[in-house]
Amino acid sequence: MIRGMYAAATGLVVAGEQQEVTAYNLANSGLPGFRERGLVYESFDRVLGRTADPTGDVTGARVARAYHDFRPGPLQQTGRPTDLALGDPDRFFVLSGPDGPLYTRNGTFYLTPAGQLVSQAGYALQGTNGPVIIPPDSTTYSIGLDGSVTADGQPAGDLRLVRFRDPQQLTAAGPTLYAAPPNAGLEVAPGRVMQGYREGSNVQPADAMVRMILSARYFDAAQRSLRSMAESLQLNTRPTGS
């Protein structure tokens, strides 16, 4: 019975963590460039089986790891010249973060009075030779499909685009921002850039709601099981005659 209580308790933890992740995905489902997050589970029996033969009498589960789903989101035409979308699903914009480069698929940028293209958090969009700067006295500017920037018909730089050999090594630095450790396999990779578009979130709200309902039911089932076993244990251990 103690093993059963332990299994039910770990089920509560797993279901609660799944609800948190699903709620986070739903909260950011309208954020451009957001990538859905998920969890991978494993049983304790499997964990022990890596070093010894599974016995079958070890119960319980845990979260093995979290991951990001980097499948592309839908493209939305906005007509804003500072909105950019990447045509290749594995490319990222490069931003100048407070502690080093950051990477994002969120192409919602703004033009500062100094002519810099910056993210919503104020991080400068990087070109191949530093921050992208549009001369403040320019009357027109455009960004080509190849990422080239022109202002009043004159070259003003090229966007720096990258990809990663193992994007699952990226660590979240915000809802749509990622930091890259050395083992992520950073590669400079020019790609297609679409001005006047932005990429939406890849979260499917209806699917996320179904997962939210299922995890809530798993949580309730584990809670009922734990309560039943606790009551049964209390009855079985009550002194005779009490």
Image (cartoon, helix red, strand yellow):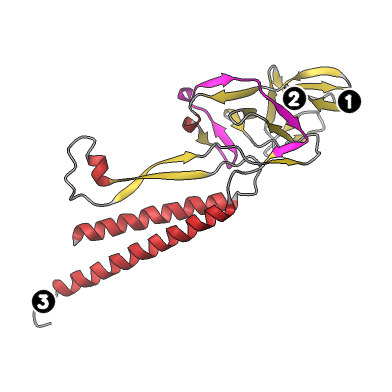
- Which residue corresponds to mark 1? 138
Which image quarter is the C terminus in? bottom left
Pick the quarter of the image with the N terminus: bottom left
Task: Determine whether the residue tagged by mark 3 lies in a helix, strand or loop.
Answer: loop
In the image, residue 196 lies in the stretch drawn in magenta: yes
- The span from disc 2 to disc 1 (Cα, nearest Å) is 20 Å
* Picture residue at 29% right of the left edge, 65% below the top: 226
- Please state which of residues 194 and 135 is positioned toward the viewer in this rendering: 194
Find residue 62 and report its horizontal and vertical position in percent.
33, 47
Q: Where does the magenta region start and end?
A: 173-198
Nearest to the observer: residue 139 or residue 45: 45
Residue 63 image point, x, y percent? 37, 46
Q: Nearer the viewer, residue 189 or 103?
A: 189
103 versus 10 height, above or below = above
The mark nearer the N terminus, 3 or 2, is 2
Whole-number angstrom distance, CA of label 3 to CA of label 2:
80 Å
* Residue kind at label 1, given as amino acid type: Ser
Q: Which residue is mark 2?
A: 145
**Neighbours of disc 3 within 10 Å: few (<14), some (14-19), many (20+):** few
Q: Looking at the picture, does residue 36 appear above or below residue 125?
A: below
**Which residue is disc 3 drawn over?**
239
Q: Tell me the residue at 89%/25% (across/down).
A: 138
